[in-house]
Amino acid sequence: MRLGGVGEAVLKIVAANLQEVFHVPVDILPARQSPEFAYSDRRKQYHAALILKNLAESRRPHPRILALVSVDLFIPVLTHVFGEAQMGGRAAVVSLHRLRQTEEGSRVSLDTFYHRAVKVALHEMAHTFDLVHCSQAECIMRLSSGPSDLDELPLFFCEYCEAFLEDAYRRYDIQRLPD
Amino acid sequence: MADKIRILVVDDELVIRESLHGWLKKSGYKVDTAEGGSAALAMLEKTPYDLLFLDIMMPVMSGIEVLEVVKEEYPHTLVVMITAYGSVETAVQAMKVGAVDYLMKPFDPDQLSLLTEKLMQQKRIMDENIFLREQMAEAIRFENLVGRSEAMQELFVMIQDVAESDSPVLITGETGTGKELVAKAIHAKSGRHNGPFIPINCGAFPEHLLESELFGHERGAFTGAHRAKKGRLDLAHHGTLFLDEVGTVPLKMQVDLLRVLETKEFHRLGGTTEIEVDFRTISATNRDLQQAIKKGEFRQDFFYRLNVISLHIPPLRLRRDDIPLLAEHFLDRYTRETNKDIDTISKEAMSLLRKYDWPGNVRELENAIERAVVICRKRLLGPEEFSFLAPHLLAATETYSLEKTQIAHLLKVLKEFDWNITRAAQALEINRVTLHKKIKKYELRPDRASK
């Protein structure tokens, strides 16, 4: 689902990749308005935890809901976050705000931007399946320290995280798509 | 993933506690929170924390005050000060008192993750040093399995049966029951007895050391790996690998080990060559693994792989008949080791040892005998040599049994009258025939208590 001014293309790309990597059916829900309820006057940013709470209360039947937003997100203790998710919960949110440029401020290609959005979405969604950050270099669950670090991440899970994910599907009784 | 690292977040602001807690949990750390200094100190008393994020500006007890106590009483806990108010002076003061770093709220996520990773590295090195010191201090002992109780006899039969197959065995039992001895006995009676018995205590190693201990490493695999080293998996070839405290193996390594157990192939850290191995696995734990599986701390597939045959060793308190035999066995060993002339353990002392519950099982009994032998200045170990077990022993001596109370009282009176039956009977206000009958019934004798 997208909240506010998020392009349809990035939404479809993220949805397709979630379905491909997690092997679970993914629906695209109707767009909703920008999450002004989560805006902090003091921080001039949007409080990620409030957005998650709102998403988790959705009456939709989906076991997991991920929202894409174009605004900048924060949690009280950090200056910003690319995304946030409820560990073992229902909701995840990804901010596209900082993914369009390098640390120095120059714009990145559309291709790089899409890749980054997909990686943050996969990473955050995996948190809802209890996966924690991974120390393997070749894993989407590795903690990235900046937008350009995201570019180094692969689009897949390491074998350990794959195994933990399998456990989580069983634990949460998630139906997977046939191969 | 950051197994076993425990972090405490101390801040009076709920939103800060919650968000830092959530962020750290995503990195796999075990995180608790406290809203003030006194709550934090109370938690530190119960749980050893590796790292504290400590807010400077808190009501009642300031962060600096908490820091002073922590550095005094828990010097191994690393402390990072956090504050919303930038003050170089307070930062300098905190660093002088012993904080390892200083962060301004809100933190840059990159800065926080780099700092946390750096501190965890520092902590691992500290733990490794402590571990190596403990290893050097640890005495290595071997002993035989001892026990003639029904439970142990059944166990011996099981060991014999199990030894003949090559299936993995999981030994369960409380700490100190002798799980490694059982594993050794199985190995000794198995077809692999000419091969090595390679034990590894999985709970005794920090995670990264356990990995290199098990799998070995190639030269240059990590900083400090100057030479290639064979892991225990390698060393166990044609023999038995004993995974002690298997319940503590981190989840990731469970995945790795499961693969090795299934394929009997692995590669060393930093290496790419697959090494084929042939060994039998015996593992042991005092944890309830079914419960650990439910909590997501132990993999079910790994459990099934280990638990093809299960053996349970009963705690010592459920086989009290073995206590005298074990006590004499240890007495014999330690009198020889210390060159002391101690013949036996007195009836009273043995009776106390039998009544004690031995929460540390055979290992605790062994330690008790060793200590008693060291402090004993006679040729007999009496109850006074086991006074260090008090108050448990004192409680154990209390009896509500009418018969035992009667025996104790009869002995006391007989001793007081120097076994003069007439005078003792008078004092007891019974006739001599009755006293004789009781002496006969309870087999009372001047030189010993009763049977």
Image (cartoon, coloured by chain):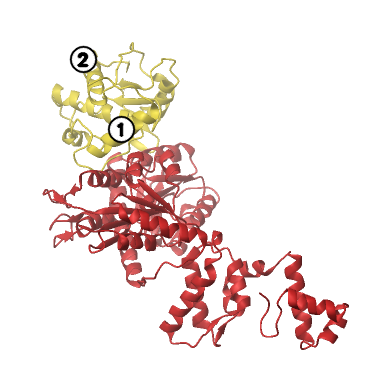
Q: In this view, does B15 lie to the left or right of B401?
A: left
**Residue assigned mark 2:** A9
Q: Which of marks 1 and 2 is nearer the N terminus?
A: 2
Q: Percent position (x, y) of residue B376? A: 54, 84
Quadrant in the picture for the C terminus of chain A:
top left
Residue B215 vs residue A107, the one in the foreground: B215
B353 is higher (above) or lower (below) than B97: below
Dot 2: chain letter: A
Q: How crowded is mark 2: few (under 14 residues within 10 Å), some or many (20 or more)?
A: few
Secondary element at tag 2: helix
Residue B137 placement: quadrant: bottom left
**Amino acid type, residue under disc 2 in the picture:** Ala
Dot 1: chain letter: A
Name the tint of chain A in the rendering.
yellow
Residue B28 placement: quadrant: top left
A19 is higher (above) or lower (below) than B52: above
Chain in red in the render: B
Q: Are marks 1 and 2 on the same chain?
A: yes
B369 is higher (above) or lower (below) than B14: below
Mark drawn on residue B121: none
Mark drawn on residue A165: 1
Q: Distance between the residues labelled 1 and 2?
A: 28 Å
Q: Residues within 10 Å of mark 1 (few under 14, many from 20)?
A: some
Which residue sits at x=15%, y=29%? A106
